[in-house]
Image: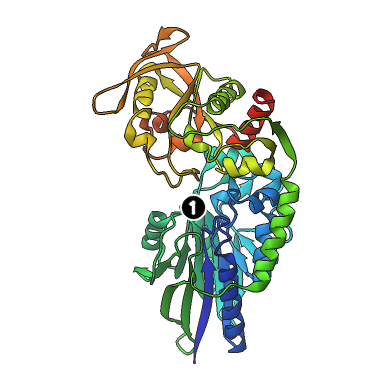
């Protein structure tokens, strides 16, 4: 006898609720159908379901996301970095208290020695006809952030070596829920023959059908849940082994919305308006936002960042503020709308010559007009770099480009051998946007505060 076992999964929703009612309708319908056919079926999420870029996620600190997953009928989930490092310790510790699904993450532990009741390293489930399935969860090890929030993420491979051996003894099939990214997933498939399926996320990669490495099938469904994933395993009970592994992703953007979910989202938005509706400040005049020009609000925000971190210098890109502040009452929801990014303040140390190179790079057209997606940035373009306690003289050449003429700190030219502490957005510590910042050996991140927390402080202090 052969038995088909079904798994439907989502990854990297990032609180993009525009797709959620379609996702909900599709998943509920598929689970009901499979159960009616007497087939085993589980619904799974691979992390980054929560993203505080959305006001609902912000207002409820992720708990509304969990409630929405409960409504759909999820069975299993692992956590992503957006759950892990954008919430204060207590908020994450209690995030899944009301979850009707099991949360599995084998490489995460609390430094406080007070583990959440919901956190499990592995889970064992069983199909209708008795096939034993072991599930492991792993999340990306961003310990520079996690440890500031009293969590520790262990090295994924070392954790797998421990748990795969145990599950191999007690289960027939092993599935990894991986919020590690495509490169890590492929390497794990090469190293661990006993893992049958890797359901991935984090790097927003999309497999329309699965990728087979050795005998492990890898799959992932992109981002924002425009696609939902399906894994189908065929177990032969007479041979006592898997005889087929399939993985697909389905475009759900054209599907009908689930009306119950739409109603729930509308109700959550009404409650969000109440929670975030407190007035922060009353403005007599509109505050203008310009992405490619110096403005008072960006200067004051950059000054606040420098003073708050006690750094020598601060720098922020004008693109972090998405829209103007209209005259009238400004609420926390307005601040969130205008500065929605999950970006934390950070201080790096740079030598004078490195800081000079950063300033020069920041005025290039390539950087200021860069349409960035990722690294926590949720805006349109990087925009002009604004500096605090650093004077930058520039000039325009015939080609229309702006160039740096001179940079001074406290009235003197930068000392190329002196170390300066530079406060900025943590965005620039990743990738190759500003290599000198990313390569700095000294980085101090400030968590759980976001830039918008400093923006609220700036408005209260400087725009009354």
Residue 462 figure quarter: top right
Q: Position of residue 95 (x, y in %)?
A: 69, 53
- Name which residue lies at 39% across and 70% down: 208
- Name which residue lies at 42% across and 77% down: 245
Furthest-top residue in view?
412
Q: Is residue 257 left or right of residue 231?
A: right
Question: On screen, 115 above or below 283?
Answer: below
Q: Quadrant of the C terminus?
A: top right
Question: On screen, 274 above or below 237?
Answer: above
Res 118 seen here: no
Q: Is residue 441 left or right of residue 365?
A: right
Q: In this view of the protein, which residue sits in the foreground, 249 or 383?
A: 383
Q: How is the image coloured?
A: rainbow
The number of discs equals: 1
Question: On screen, 311 above or below 204?
Answer: above
- Name which residue lies at 63% across and 70% down: 75
How crowded pointer 1 is (Cα within 10 Å; few <14, some 14-19, many 20+) is rated as many
Q: In this view of the protein, which residue sits in the foreground, 456 or 188?
A: 456
Residue position for label 1: 156
Q: Is residue 137 left or right of residue 271?
A: left
Q: In this view of the protein, which residue sits in the foreground, 235 or 161?
A: 235
Q: Position of residue 230 (x, y in %)?
A: 48, 74
Res 264 seen here: yes
Q: Position of residue 181 (x, y in %)?
A: 43, 55
As helix, strand or loop, the secondary structure at mark 1 comes to helix
Q: Position of residue 304 (x, y in %)?
A: 59, 24
């Amino acid at each position: 006898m052969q038995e088909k076992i079904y798994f439907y999964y989502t990854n990297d929703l990032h609180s993009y609720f525009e797709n959620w009612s379609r996702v909900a309708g599709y998943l509920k319908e598929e689970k009901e159908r499979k159960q009616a056919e007497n087939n085993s079926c589980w619904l799974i999420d691979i992390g980054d379901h929560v993203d505080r870029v959305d006001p609902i996620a912000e207002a409820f600190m992720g708990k509304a996301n969990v409630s929405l997953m409960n409504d759909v009928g999820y069975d299993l989930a692992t956590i992503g970095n957006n759950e892990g490092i954008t919430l204060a310790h207590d908020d994450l510790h209690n995030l899944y208290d009301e979850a009707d699904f099991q949360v599995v993450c084998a490489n995460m532990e609390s430094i406080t020695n007070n583990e959440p009741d919901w956190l499990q390293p592995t889970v064992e489930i069983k199909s209708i006809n008795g096939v034993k399935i072991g599930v492991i969860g792993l999340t990306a090890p961003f310990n520079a952030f996690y440890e500031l929030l009293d969590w520790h993420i262990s090295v994924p491979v070392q954790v797998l070596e421990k748990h795969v051996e145990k599950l191999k003894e007690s289960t027939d099939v092993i599935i990894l829920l991986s919020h590690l990214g495509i490169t890590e997933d492929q390497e794990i498939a090469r190293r661990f023959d006993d893992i049958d399926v890797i359901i991935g996320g984090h790097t927003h990669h999309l497999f329309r059908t699965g990728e087979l490495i050795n005998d492990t099938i890898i799959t992932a469904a992109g981002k924002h849940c425009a696609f939902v994933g399906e894994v189908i395993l065929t177990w032969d009970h007479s041979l006592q082994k898997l005889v087929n592994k399939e993985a697909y992703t389905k475009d759900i953007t054209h599907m009908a919305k689930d009306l119950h979910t739409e109603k729930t989202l509308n109700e959550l938005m009404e409650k969000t308006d109440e929670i975030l509706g407190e007035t922060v400040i009353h403005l007599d005049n509109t505050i203008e936002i310009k992405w490619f020009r110096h403005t008072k609000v960006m200067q004051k925000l950059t000054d606040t960042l420098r003073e708050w971190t006690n750094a020598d210098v601060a720098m922020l890109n004008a693109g972090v503020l998405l829209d103007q502040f209209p005259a009238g009452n400004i609420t926390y929801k307005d601040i969130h709308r205008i500065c929605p990014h999950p970006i934390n303040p950070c201080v790096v140390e740079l030598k004078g010559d490195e800081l000079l190179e950063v300033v020069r790079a920041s005025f290039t057209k390539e950087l200021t007009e860069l349409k960035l997606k990722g690294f926590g940035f949720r805006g349109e373009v990087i925009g002009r770099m604004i500096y605090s306690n650093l004077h930058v003289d520039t000039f325009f050449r015939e080609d229309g480009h702006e160039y740096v003429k001179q940079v001074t700190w406290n009235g003197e030219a930068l000392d190329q051998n002196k170390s300066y502490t530079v406060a900025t957005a943590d965005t620039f510590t990743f990738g190759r946007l500003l290599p000198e910042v990313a390569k700095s050996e000294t980085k101090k991140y400030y968590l759980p505060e976001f830039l918008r927390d400093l923006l609220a402080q700036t408005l209260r202090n400087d725009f009354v």
